[in-house]
Image (cartoon, rainbow, N blue to C red):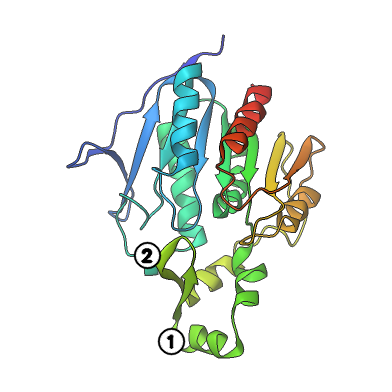
Amino acid sequence: MPAPNPAPAPAVPARDGTPILARPDGATIAYRALAGATPGIVFLGGFRSDMTGNKALFLHDYCRRRGRAFVRFDYFAHGASSGDFADGTIGRWAEDAIAVIDSLTAGPQILVGSSMGGWVMVLAALARPARVAALVGIAAAPDFTADLLPRRLSAAQQHELHTAGRIVLPSSYDPAGYLYTRALVEDGDRHLVLRGDLPLYCPVRLLHGLADDSVPWQQSLKLAERLAGDDVSLTLVKGGDHRLSREADLARLAQVLDALG
């Protein structure tokens, strides 16, 4: 039986009782954690999502029932964490993930990254390869600021983004739309992971819906091709959308995690 991973104590108490991890610049990262056996699981959410989403809560319950250590958290400027979303970047969110791994977990961890979280999990694994037991990507969206976002923009919108420094695009997940900034795109260019081989050798499982209208499944295929390790598989889900949070999708995720140990 793996050694238990002790429940981390919050660095600073939050007013509503949610534990928070203090960052060196004064920002606070809200999180929830479970003590349990290793390898633990760390959930990395998507762009503008938070730790109260369906997959995050499903994984919390999955780990509770199996006695596994688990951490879910909100990136800077997401959910209950502090910060202005206009100041958020891929690099900053990856630093949040690395800080969570360093400060709130012990022993090997399975990183589960959803959408943008699939990019963040790769960056975190490259930074802490010895701490990562496996990677699980759900509709992974690595390099989306360079590969996907420009396709959504007209010439006029691209001009607005680069001159005004920001643009709000319609989103099926938020009636107010999603803000994208020039800083996000420029920082994304500094953290691209699909432009060369990735020296990661842990098991990797990628799940992607064929009906995903936000991130094409080919993005997960590109990631699989770039990974140096051989223990990599991509499962394409017929009828699966971007969220992959239907009952059958969550059951499939649980099977993947069970097989990874």
Element at badge 1? helix
Q: Do the residues labelled 2 and 1 touch (CB within 8 Å)?
A: no
Q: Which of 11 and 139 is in front in this view?
A: 139
Query: Who comes first in sequence, dot 2 or dot 1?
Result: 2
Q: Position of residue 42 (x, y in %)?
A: 50, 36
User: Does residue 92 appear left or right of residue 85 in this picture?
Assistant: right
Quarter of the figure with the C terminus? top right
Q: Nearer the viewer, residue 224 or 55?
A: 55
Q: What residue type is labelled 2?
A: Phe
Q: Where is residue 73 in the image (x, y as percent from the top left)?
A: 40, 42
**161 vs 70: above or below:** below
**258 vs 208: above or below:** above
Q: Which amino acid does label 1 sit on?
A: Ala
Q: Which residue is labeled 2 in the image?
A: 85
Image quadrant assignment for residue 251: top right
Q: Where is residue 171 in the image (x, y as percent from the top left)?
A: 48, 67
Q: Which of 23 and 222 is in front in this view?
A: 222
Badge 2 density bin: few <14, some 14–19, many ≥20, Cα 10 Å: some
Q: Nearer the viewer, residue 110 or 150?
A: 150
Q: Which residue is labeled 1 in the image?
A: 164
